[in-house]
Each structure stands twice: as structure tokens, then as C-alpha cells.
Image (cartoon, helix red, strand yellow):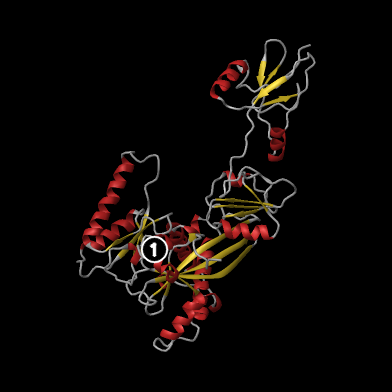
Amino acid sequence: MSSKCSVDPCSYGQDAAETRLEKKRGQEKEETEVPCGSSRPAGSLRKEGPGREQTLPPQTQTWKERQTFSQSSVNQESQSGGPCIMAQPVQRSKLKDLSGRQIEEPRGPGPFYFFGGTNGAKIVSNYCESRGWKRIYNKDREDFNLKWCETKSPAQYSNFREGRQLMYQIPNNKVLTTKIGLLSSLQQYERVSSRVSHGQALRRLKMEEFIPTTLRMDVREEREAFFAQQEGVSNRESRMWICKPTGMNQGRGIFLLKSKEDIAAFRLKLKHMEDCRFNRKMHYRQPQAYIVQHYIQNPLLLKGKKFDVRSYLLIACTAPYVVFFRHGYVRLTCDLYDPTSKNLSAHLTNQYMQKKNPLYSQLKEDTVWSMESFNAYVNDRFQAAKDLPRDWVLGAFAKRMQQIMSQCFLAVKSKLDCRLGFFDLIGCDFLVDEDFKVGVAAGDELQSSSPYKL
């Protein structure tokens, strides 16, 4: 009777040749011997009587089983007296910490957390480890209690165990975190809500109360209306517009439209992108979508500098929804505000843009204020002059931010994927003009570069 063996098809009938080739290359490989007729690897061959072979279907293994199997070598002779060998290299961790030491995957019962990326790693790691959690580095492990990934991919949600694990980022949060996603959600919410009667306690804000005039350049009707409107306007009469690419953050890709020449050049750029897509020169990716927005030319200034306020919306649970507001911090430019300046760092307040300023290293500490410092400054400089209530920042301003964030959340609530264990932390940026009117920029996924953030 012939014995049945599990053999890796890649090495089937080629073991000797591959061994010689590996020796020439100086590569180290380890052989794992499996007992005949037992645990066949995915895609292995099995003899089915004389002259016939079948490919076995892949078999699913848990991460723990795969890890245990890769660490052991089993030698067992078949009934005919020969071992069945599957030549397969063992994957060894090449991860190293900042000091160059090799990182070993933790073992034991856990609890474990996985952090992918660098954005906010120190904050999350310090908290988890203070509670006795151990960090794992293998993104394919399934025995995590918390998984925090900077970027999303369908694979990271495939083995999510609802109600037993925590997963940072709701899979389709782009309806809230991207400029076009949020704008579309708010417009749709406003159309629906305008037909519904709300009580006084639930007064809905109108979009023009907290978002400047905004047009989508990927929508033909809005694009053509924008350019048609600009044709009859002189440079002297024209308003400044700010153009933002959707799906990007930290000020990347933003530019100003200050004159008719700027608008004409932008129109040509969009036409070129449309032509490329039509001619299938850009079939491999979608062309960048933009929005244009009225630029607030009369912002409130702190010590002569433009600023915005970063606050946080924490969606702690999606089944049921549990949502929190959290104060953040104030971001200021390095340069004094000049609406005619062509330097973007004078118009955009985020740290990514300010770091490009040659004076950033000297002025770094002045580009971030706490909310308490902001409140004290407004009390001192504007309370009497603008007839504001005392502590306007921590009172009326905070309430207004919560109103706006609540409306943004309600606009996307029915669209978000809801599973017990999904959560999200959204950074929301607010602008204040010289009349103390509060507006919001498009929401953004959590960015971490400031000690005041959490």
C-alpha cells in the first residue's frame, strides 16, 4: 500500500534543484517535516489511487496555529519508512525599534493592541501600556483587543469580531472626513430636514450659517455656474476663493484664486484633467476632485496673526451611537496676516504649512495656544470692545462648535457602518471672523503633531 504525503507543490519534484540554487545564493532555509497523511498545507497534492493526483482545497488556519506550526519541526516516518518533507522558509521578524534592537512578538493571553503608522502612536501606546496591554506588530494577527490603523483597507476589517474587539476608524467615514463627503452629506441633510418640522430645542442650523459658499468642481452644473459667474467680474470686484482638493489634509494641494488670470488657469487645468480622462490617459486613477470656497478675508486675528481652532468629535460607539465633544487647541501662523500675500503659510494655519516657514524653529511655541490662553486673550482684548459675555471662548463659542459638530454628525448618522466595536476620532477645524461668526472647515481624520491635541 502506498503512503499518502502532503508536499508543497512548489518543491514537488524540484527539491534537489532548489536546494542547490539556495546554497549558491547563500540563503538560509529551514525544512519543516510533516507526518504523512496529516495536516496538508493549502494547495498540496494527494494521491488518489494509481496514476491520479488531486489538488486539495486551501485549509484555514488561525494565526496561533500558523505561528505554532512555523516554530516546530515534526519528523515522522511514513508507513514505507520515509519522511514526507515540505521545504518552506520560516518567516522571522525583522522589526526593530529606534535603538536598533529586534522586536519580538509578545505571547501569552494578552490583552494585545496593534498600532499601524506613526500618527498618534506615542499617545495611544502610552495609554494602552499603562493598562498592561502589549503591543503586537504583525498586522495579520487576529488576537488583538484594539486595532488602530492610520490608513484603512478592506483586509483589516475582514476578521473583525464584533462586540469582542475595538477597531479605530469607521470603514466608510469619508462621508464625514473628506471635504466633498461632508459637503454632500450636509446638502442632502438640509434638503430632507427642510421638509420636517423641528422643535425649538432642536433648531437646525442653515448651512450658510457655518459654511462659506462652496461649489464642487466635479459636478458639471456647479463648475459651469462658478466660471460663468466669474466671467463678468473684474479683478477689482472679484472676491478671493480658496481651492481645496478633496481627500487630502495638512494643506496639501490647496491654492488661492485671487484674480481672473488665476481662475482662467484653473479652468484650463480642469479641462486638461477632463480631456485626459476622456482619452483614457488617466484610466488607472480618478482625477483629483476639488471644491472652491469663498475665502474669509476678514478673520479675527490674535496678535495680528490668522488662526483656527481644532476640536474633536469622538464617536465612541456606533451600536448604539455614543458621541462626545472635546476641546482641542488653537493654531496660529508664524507671519502677520496679509490678505495679499502669495505665501500660503500666511493663510493656512496647520503645522505642516508652518514648518515651511524659515522662522518656524524660533516661533514654534507661539504657533499653538491652549483654549485657556485663547479665552484669556479674548476676555482681555475683545470682551468690552465687541460686547461679548465673559469667557466667550469656553461658553458661547464652545456651544456653537458643539451645535455645528452635532449637525455634521446627524447628516451622516444614517450612512455610517454600524458594528459594535467601531469607533472614530475626528478633528474638526473652526474659523472665527472679526464679527465673531463661527464657521467650520471640512472635517478631517485625526492628525497628531501638537502636545495640546489630547
Where is mark 1, residue-wise? 354
Badge 1: residue crowd in 10 Å (few <14, some 14–19, many ≥20): many
Locate residue 120, reporting x and y percent: 55, 58
Residue type at the position of mark 1: Gln
Q: Quadrant of the N terminus?
A: top right
Relative to 320, is 2 on the left or the right?
right
Residue lying at 30% horizontally and 63% vertically, measured from the top left: 343
Residue 437 position by quadrant: bottom left
Locate residue 352, reporting x and y percent: 42, 60
Residue in front for this viewpoint, 201 or 140: 140
Helix, strand or loop under label 1: helix
Residue in front for this viewpoint, 44 or 279: 44
Seen in the picture, residue 369 relative to 107 is either above or below; the reply is: below
Residue lying at 35% horizontally and 62% vertically, measured from the top left: 358
Q: Quadrant of the C terminus?
A: bottom right
Seen in the picture, residue 259 relative to 288 is either above or below; the reply is: below
Residue lying at 64% horizontally and 26% vertically, measured from the top left: 43
Residue 184 position by quadrant: bottom left
Locate residue 253, reporting x and y percent: 36, 55
